[in-house]
Amino acid sequence: MKEIKERISINDIVKRLEYLREFHGHLGPYIIMGARIAILSNKCLGDYPFKKYVKVYTGYSPPKSCPVDGIQFFSSCTLGKNNIEIVNEGISKAIFTLKNTKLIIELKAPINIPKNATQEEIGKIALKFLKLDDEQLFNVKILKL
Ligand SMILES: [Zn+2]
């Protein structure tokens, strides 16, 4: 069952990858990470664009800030609805809140992009990142408040 859910979520990203690229301007592992975090939040909390709130602990400049667009695109927590907050901590963690539930998603290991990587190489890293399971990528905690 879990495997099927995982497959559905990755297919969901793949189907909308071109829209995500148009929205964000390029595709790299950080935006894919944001997309994965958002889809995982939808799986754990449901898809409530007006009730869900997220605090994203990341950086203020690319590529660290790129996950923010993936999170906005797939979770519907957006700057326009004021249900997303960005905290400049240079890490990769998101805390979603819905009613009395808190969902903490943290990247297990930092993403390494070689300094002189070409867009093609970055794209390959992104694809590799896309294929990993949620369990390989993230530590997930659900807390009842
Ligand atoms: Zn980016």
Image: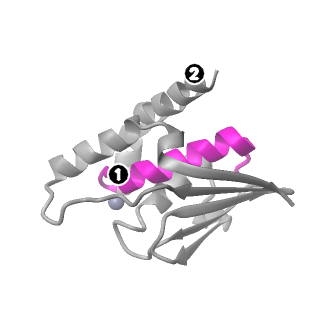
Left or right of residue 80: residue 121:
left
50 w.r.t. 55: above or below = above
Q: Name the residue located 38 percent from the left edge and 74 percent from the top edge.
A: 61
20 w.r.t. 16: above or below = below
Q: Residues within 10 Å of mark 2 (few under 14, many from 20)?
A: few
Q: Main secondary structure of the magenta part?
A: helix
Question: Residue 16's image quarter?
Answer: top left
Q: Amino acid at mark 2?
A: Ile
State the image coordinates of residue 125 (x, y, percent, origin top left).
Answer: 27, 47
Q: Nearer the viewer, residue 4 or 70?
A: 4
State the image coordinates of residue 134 (x, y, percent, origin top left).
Answer: 52, 41
Quarter holding ligand 1: bottom left
How far separated are the C-alphas under marks 1 and 2? 23 Å
Left or right of residue 12: residue 131:
left
Q: Amino acid at mark 1?
A: Pro
**Disc number placed over residue 4 in the picture, else none:** 2
User: Which portion, as a residue range, is magenta?
Assistant: 25-49
- Residue beneath label 1, please? 29
Q: Name the residue located 57 percent from the left edge and 48 percent from the top edge.
A: 38
138 w.r.t. 4: above or below = below
